[in-house]
Amino acid sequence: MTAQNKLVLVDGSSYLYRAYHAMPDLRADPGNPDSPATGALRGMINMLQALRKEEPSAYAVCVFDASGPTFRDDIYPQYKANRAPMPDDLRAQIAPIHQVVLAMGWPMLAVPGVEADDVIATLASQAAAQGMQVLISSGDKDLAQLVTENIVIYDTMNGKRRDEAGVLAEFGVPPSLMIDYQTLVGDTVDNVPGVTKVGPKTAAKWLQEWGSLDNLLANADAIKGVAGQNLRDAREWLPTAAQLVTMKRDVADLPALADLAMREPNKPALAELYDQYGFKTLLRNLGETGAAQPLTITAQSSGNGDLFAIDTPTAAPVAASTAAGPATAAAAATPSIVRETGSGYQGFTGTVQYATILSWDDFDAALARWQQAELVAIDTETTSLDQMRAEIVGISVSTAPGEGAYIPLAHDYPGAPEQLPREEVLARLKPWLENAKHAKLGQHIKYDRHVLANHGIAVHGYLHDTMLESYVLEAHKPHGLESLAERHTGRQGTSYESLCGKGASQIPFSQVDIDTASHYACEDADQTFDVHQVLWPQLENNAALRGIYELEIASSEVLFRMEREGVLVDAPLLAQQSQALGTRIVELEEEAYALAGQPFNLSSPKQLAEIFFDKLGMPVVKKTATGARSTNEEVLEKLAEDYPLPARILEHRSLIKLKSTYTDKLGQLALPATGRVHTHYSQAVAITGRLSSTDPNLQNIPVRTAEGRRIREAFIAAPGKRIASADYSQIELRIMAHLSDDAALLNAFRNGEDIHKATASEVFNVALEEVSSEQRRYAKVINFGLIYGMGRFGLAKNLGITNSAAGTFIDRYFERYPGVRRYMDETKAQAKEQGYVETVFGRRLYLPEINSPNGPRRAGAERAAINAPMQGTAADLIKKAMVAVQALIDAENPRVQMIMQVHDELVFEVPEGDIDWVREHIPTAMAQVAELKVPLLAELGVGDNWEQAH
């Protein structure tokens, strides 16, 4: 979507309810519980600000429900009869919300006689018909009936976007059938009955089978059982239900698209409103507002009454580039900041004091204060996000919330003031930064450590990382500083993009004027300190969570050293592999042309469909949301079972991915001076505690194909050294035995049995020594499949057997391992009750969808509830192993270097003479990091490259 060709439609009624329930009980006067409620108002402002920033558009409108009955009440007097009345605190905020929306520059609509959804549907349909791209911002699933190629729905509360494919995946039917789906299911919120006892699964199944509600009703007599009778009983009602759930797309007398242009915010009016309702932080962020200017509402009207409003003083439309472009003015003076989240935190409530250090006298005075402080927050401003290549532009430090100082070191725009010499400043800071006795704090400290290391400074004394504090407390939420400050302290900071722009027009931080840069940098350090004072007490007083946090901090140290060391890659070998893959890719194209009887674009779904289904007569496996014949990977895999052409297409795609992602790229990622790649390990991404890696992504190197395994051959040791790989054996199955306390599983591991043979013996009821290789293979799939929540359909597909046979195997498994079934049932129940599950060591794994009314989402969360404690415990164990092994190496053999961590594996670069030491000590150290009910087992291999070490 381009901003100039985009219309954003905000479901204001949905926004205000969600804002009301999401925000705490804020008041205009925090000390007076009888002062006006402001939570919904503040939440609304936050949501609209975020949306405007994230989705810049030339046209937009915020649509609210008008008061009074609608045409649906005439059709069905009981419509929405069960809805509770609007809370008084929310009702009192409606008028202020309307005022703020207009002052923020959003046109606003409220049309009597229809609902906000009908207005949205009409405007969306009209704009899409004119070739516009439409984004509807709402959490209302009913709007899914509007989705087309040009209309998508975006839920800002969870980041979900519903396009055509998303609707099909979520509901089981395309948008074109959503009205039929909603008619069958009904809507309990709006008191619209559907078919009794027919839920989402049945509705989707019927519509998939019969193609439409009309066709379903025409064949209702063929539907068996109670559901069929209920359908027949509802025949007379369903046309009325369809009327109620169908959104009008022809609401009359709506404004023209040109009248829906986004406007500049009316800053004077906003300042007055923010001051009136106690939003001091928002008021501060407005900067200079100019002379007082009233909010003057101009409304267009029709026979239906007032229905469109704009704020007259700022009626000039906003150019799309302006809405998203960088700020140019320096930050204004900052008034006092007050806590607005109701978090109970009683820290900073004063005036911010930020300083820019441009003289040695100021530097010496500041450094003396920092050296005496109990804890300091440090942040670096740099030339790049590439941690191995980034250079320092400036450093900011804070010793308390509301306070900060910035040392600009490399701002180079025309007219920039003289700055202290970078290398001399860093030399003077080095003793303090490298002294572990001086306690330090940061946000994503691993990055700052790399940046400072690039300048020869080995920082010690980092005790805290706000990103990791957040990750341990709420892994399922964002962990960026801007998000943390807003969520935990009610403070909104200056965004990087507002200073530097984004995309091709983004300027380097070194070209931001120093006054503006200083405010931004000081704010980062200041807010890091502020957020820490909110989060740390929650960890400090919880033994289990504090233990996980200390593990993450220790892991950060080891990961920093691993990233710094890097791993050597064989660039000539990668070039040979790229050439071989390129040759094979061309061969596959020629083979595909021969099988198809003509040349074609192997990446074109349209051409593939024509050749597969029209020319070669292959069966249509499934269709896309738009009704087109699908040729996605799942379809190709199914067709490849019987046809050679889809198999060639799959191989072609996999080789192209290998070539572009790894063999072409790995050599380019290596630092020219060393020939080593330095992957970036992300700790705060996976909610299970697992690490992820980028540039390169080590976790996703495919190992099931020969071509994928060859890539690992390019990870080599330096001359005179070898690669060693140590990994845990069957770690998640061992954790399952521990968690489930199942006697048979525990005995199998304690006795050192082959767990897959032991399972096969139980499931197939044969003696252990009589288990065949095929039975063991089946048992292995069952063992791992059940851990990941695989049902009989998935098991049947994996084993190539019938659903009935798969169900029989699963039943036998649970008969032999009843403790596993008990663990699964109890874990799901616990997750539903408390919203999270825990690892063996106390890491919390949150499951926001565990009580979702959406069946597929809830089922996914239930599967995750079973698997997450195992994956999370495995993540905890490998981190414990990483920390313990590094401590062992430091104490006894620092010649050994830990260079990679992938899944349950640690990889080392080892001098030839130290191989025996590694074989003796590393597996033992890994096995002893925790004591479970079954023994941990780590195995080690050695080779000239990573692949050989397996």
Image: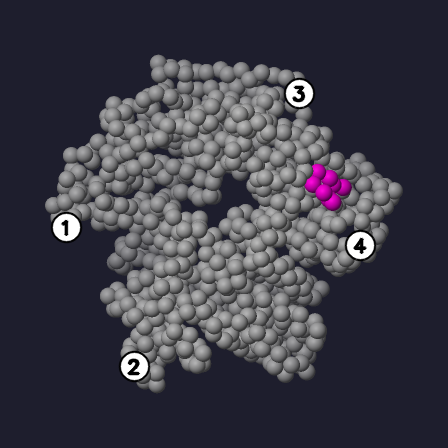
* Residue at figure coordinates x 70%, y 38% from the top left: 402
Looking at the image, the residue that sits furthest to the left is 221
Tell me the residue that label 1 is attached to. 224
Q: Amino acid at mark 2?
A: Val
Foreground disc of the pair 3, 4:
4
Where does the magenta region start and end?
398-405
Tell me: 665 left or right of 210: right
- The reply to whether callout 2 and callout 3 are in contact (CB within 8 Å) is no
Please tell me the numbered disc located at residue 432: 4
| Disc 4 residue crowd, few under 14, some 14–19, many 20+, Cα 10 Å | some
- Mark 4, secondary structure of its residue: helix
Helix, strand or loop status at disc 2: loop
Return the x and y of residue 546 as percentages of the image width and height: 59, 56
How many angstroms separate mark 1 from mark 4 (CA)? 79 Å
Residue 263 appears in which quarter of the rendering? top right
Residue 443 in percent (x, y) is at 65, 49
- In the depicted view, which residue is nearer to us: 605 or 817? 817
- 413 is within the stretch colored magenta: no
Q: Which mark is residue 290?
A: 3
Tell me if residue 118 comes above or below residue 390 in the rendering. Answer: above
Specify the quadrant of the image occupied by residue 901: bottom right
